[in-house]
Image (spheres, rainbow, N blue to C red):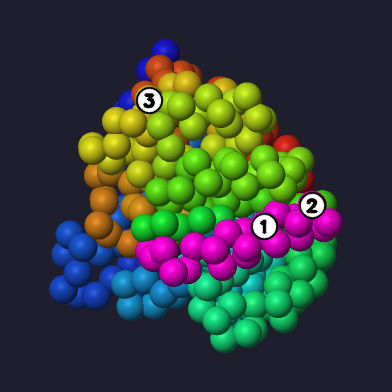
Amino acid sequence: MCNSSGGPSGSVPGAYAALNRPDAGARGWPPAPEPLPVPVMDNHTHLDFPADAGVVPAAQALDAAAAVGVRGAVQVGTDLESSRRTVELVEQEPRLLGAVAIHPNDAPDLAVAGTLEAALAEIEQLARHPRVRAVGETGLDYFRTGPEGLERQQYSFRRHIDIAKRTGTALQIHDRDAHQDVVRILREEGAPEKVVFHCFSGDAELARTCNDSGWYMSFAGTVTFRNAAYLREALAVADPSLMLVETDAPFLTPHPWRGRPNASYLVPATVRSMAAELDRDLAALCTDLAANTERVYGTW
Ligand SMILES: [Zn+2]
Ligand SMILES: [Zn+2]
């Protein structure tokens, strides 16, 4: 059964409409999609990153998400400041769990400054918070970091893998143009029990590797992009018990709103696109996504 209908049906949620600049036009916050029949969670979002003139308070962002069947989210830190903020947010908001890390694009600078070890020690401490359930986003980014930073980036990734194992949390991986080295380092270090490729960007071959290794693939708005046939081939191969969905908001807004700001209330657009691509019943896919999410992070 195919459920590809369900485009924009609602208006822009109030807290977002208030942020839309009067001249935003077709560049502003998108309207709310039709609600999902079974609630899911946004596996990776940055509620503290400003987009289009501001930050929507977490409670309002999660209200807008809940109204369309997105009942929770994983708030992700990328440096010490946003990881500390992540802990504050998960303490305030029961619909949030947290992930903390030093982003691969930031790690080399900290290493050069001599502050990486102290930062990693604090990340480990933050990762022990009961509502922080993942270490991430960590990994490798060969798109933004040049050859001079790769060794330091790989070192930081190895340290984050170790922190995830010692704190018993999931590992959320940022992998940009670095599939082979990500897989190699995971194997060399020994992967934590739960590994998530956030914003999965691999092809069918990487999806098969993830299937074989029991690693989760979190699909973002990129899977809806017209020029991303390789992601849809990966989706078709991915084991349904290893699929997750995320926004990476405020980035990577799904089709047909690509280029506008993103938020958790837009997850239904990505899930519908996945159901259509997989020719799966929408409610059954949502049920799988929610169960997979709680298997990785525990209950909210
Ligand atoms: Zn990322
Ligand atoms: Zn991210």
Callout 2: 10 Å neighbours few (<14), some, many (20+)?
Answer: some
Instruction: Magenta stretch: give its range.
Output: 144-167
The quadrant of the image that shows the N terminus is top left
x and y percent of residue 261 in the render? 33, 62
Mark linked to residue 235? none
Disc on the earlier residue, 1 or 2 = 1
Give the number of the disc on residue 158: 1
Task: Tell me the residue at 36%/53% (across/down).
Answer: 252
Q: Is residue 266 left or right of residue 284?
A: left
Instruction: Point out which mark residue 165 bears.
Output: 2
- Residue 96 point in image, percent of width and height: 65, 59
Q: Which numbered disc covers residue 233?
A: 3
The answer to whether residue 180 is above or below residue 240 is: below
Residue 152 visible, this orientation: yes
Asked whether residue 150 is drawn in magenta, I would say yes
CB of mark 2 within 8 Å of CB of mark 3?
no
- Contact check, label 1 and label 3, Cβ < 8 Å: no
> Nearer the observer, disc 1 or disc 3?
1
User: Viewed as shown, does residue 99 lie left or right of 175?
Assistant: right
- Image quadrant assignment for residue 210: top right
